[in-house]
Amino acid sequence: MNEPTGALSEQARALIAEEEALLQRVLAAIESARQQAGRERGRGEALARLTGLRDEASSAVESDLPALFQQMDTERAILERKESSQLPSPHTPYFAHLRLRKHEGATHEYLLGRTTFTHAQSGVRIIDWRFAPVARVFYGYAEGDDYEEWFGERLSEGVVEARRLVVIERGVLTRIRAGALHLERAATGEWHEVGALATSSLSGGAGTAVRAGSLGTGSGQAGRAARFDITAQLDTEQFEALQTGADKPLLVLGSAGSGKTTVALHRLAQVTYELRAASAPSRMKVVVPEEGLARLSKRLLAPLELRNVSVETLDAWAYASACAAFGVKSIALSPDKPALTSKLKRHPALRPALEKRLSRKKLKDPSFKQLRRKLAELLTDRTLLEEVVTSSKEDVPWPAVEDTVRHTMLQIATPLAREYKGYDAEAMQTVDGLAIEDSTPDSLANTVDVEDLPLLLFLKARHGQLGLEPLAHAVIDEAEDFSLFELSVLGRQLGKTRSCTLAGDEMQQTSSNFAGWPAALAELGIQDAATVRLSVSYRCPRPVIELARHVLGALAPEAAPRMGREGVPVGFHHFPEEAQAWLFVRDALKDLLDREPRASVAVIASTPEAARSFYKVVDDMGAVRLVLDGGFTFEPGVDVTDVESIKGLEFDYVILPDATARAWPQSDETRRKLHVAITRTSHQLWVVSSGLRSRLLPSP
Ligand SMILES: Nc1ncnc2c1ncn2[C@@H]1O[C@H](COP(=O)(O)OP(=O)(O)OP(=O)(O)O)[C@@H](O)[C@H]1O
């Protein structure tokens, strides 16, 4: 055990000593239970030995019997010991410590973890945060508070004597947070007090920030202390949201970084626990719009012991669902499609226009081929398409009509290979061995767009069953980016109770699919969702939130989120030329990575093309990656990426390399996109521009 340093207060030293002793007691208890379990694991051998002894006894001489019977008794006793349950990991057995003093004077000690464990001899009690009733006291009260909670029929009252968050790494206590006291153990083993609270304090820290002109404040230095487990940090409103019954739909709203994903994934852990007897994890699903967030969600699910839950992007979900629903192995997707056609197919205005034209007559067994023909008929109907443009108030622009008709015609054309069936195979190839239609409009023949898949599933559902495995619970994150057709199909996959968690923020819609929460819920078949609006902004420091609100302008919601913490001022850097701006960023990145090799940095450009160009300036530097397909590794270093790829993600440092008027013009869609890029910052933000600065930014 390490002695606290002399510089610490008496109170801090006592706290460390108490927590260290507690951890040792817990580790000893787990070890003793483990040994016991090990002995129990010898059950098979004991059974074999017992049978052998019995056989021996049946033919033994009388004088040998007492010894044989004694041996048989011992083996039987081993067998009668109860099966041991799963034990907590000695590496991180718990993440919080709660001590309650009842009014009548008795104190009760609880540790919060992911595996229930009690060891009567040593008085150790680890409770599972997901269902232990006493967890409500932990999440609902602060240290020193009087508490009053009903546990079933019984009213429990008393004082929260201790409420501490702890970090245990490989069985070693490295951090403690008790109220405002925050202690950290250095690699040398010495403990010290950490200054202002890093995560959830609503005050303090002002003036401690570095200058906006320098990048880096120690957020990514080597040996950075491990974070407190997020499960231990859930606030009261987040924990309350988790109490929504497993069979109810829940809508989680809140500004960027307020913990919507955190709540949605923790609810999944809770629902999985509640439904464990009825539903396997394979009947739970997380669906998100982008690959980056899918990867992040998988990482966040691992510590919640939900590795088996499937996390899918919208496109992957639509493709797998279409193959399953239509009973086909694969579907040919178009290699290329006009952007306006994609916009039209995802737009809410298409939903009523389509509805009007669909007959009530049901096909008996609607096949992929039949529905595809039907869909092509609809998508080449100019009157219908013009109606979509008009009712979208030209949010879907007029050229979308011609683009869609032309594109659909090419898709329903007969593929050249079929048209020229019987011709010499070589004649069907170009000199470089490719099929003659490759990279020509003919390559679209017999393909569908990925945006068609939800439409085809929607059409199939109207003719009866979708034929998909029902889901016990679905998490739909960044739900503002789902089209009404996608929501409708997902709704059909949910059971009668519509058990799902919908998380979203209307300010972060990066496309114009969003039709509002009532329409989204209606499409899912939900009439009465429990709704929670998270009010504290945890990810971004105050200067970043203020800039994000400025960028939204009139779109910003009236009520600003409660600011989690102070932080480094946003750095604005303007240059006459782009080349100068990017060289400046390159130098700053190089310097930052030298000083803070553990930092996670995102350079977020306005488009994939701009990201590619910027990358050329830094591609010779180690630990710099170009990520345009969502393939984030979440390793320290720099990800050069674009605004469409980063929804739901966060980085210590964010740099916007092309904050120009051309890249970020004045429109609502751009405002929301820039706001998304800005709010990925958890520590420090730089906005770099050249030529004409974006008008969405505050004037210098
Ligand atoms: N109660 C809390 N205390 C401290 N940190 C928290 C708390 N809740 C969430 N966080 C942290 O805040 C950050 C943002 O959380 P999360 O990604 O869940 O927010 P979000 O609302 O989904 O954000 P976005 O809308 O940008 O996707 C994460 O680092 C998360 O661990």
Image (tube, grey):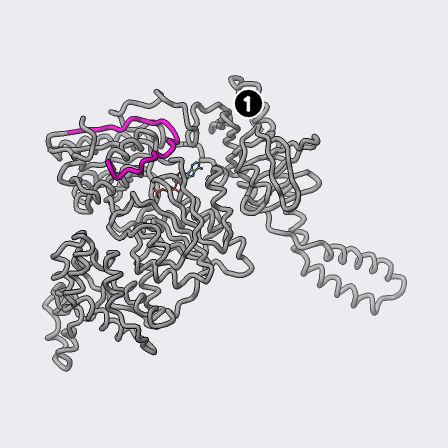
Look at the image and give the residue range highlighted in magenta: 553-574
Q: Judge whether residue 497 is colored magenta.
A: no
Name which quarter of the figure residue 136 lies in: top right
| 377 relative to 106, above or below | below
| 380 relative to 389, above or below | below
x, y (%) of residue 411?
Answer: 17, 68
Q: Is residue 582 left or right of residue 270?
A: left
Q: Is mark 1 within 8 Å of ligand 1?
A: no
x, y (%) of residue 215?
Answer: 28, 28
| Residue wearing tag 1 | 12
Q: Quadrant of ligand 1?
A: top left
Q: Which residue does the image show at 36% across and 39% down from the upper left?
A: 257
x, y (%) of residue 70?
Answer: 83, 56
- Quadrant occupied by the N terminus: top right
Q: Which residue does the image show at 40% across and 42% down from the upper left?
A: 533
Name which quarter of the figure residue 317 lies in: bottom left
- SS of the residue under disc 1: helix
Q: Which residue does the image show at 14% across and 82% down from the upper left?
A: 422
Q: Looking at the picture, which amino acid does disc 1 mark? A: Ala
Name which quarter of the figure residue 384 lies in: bottom left
* Nearer to me, 536 or 417: 536
| 22 relative to 331, above or below | above
* Nearer to me, 214 or 224: 214
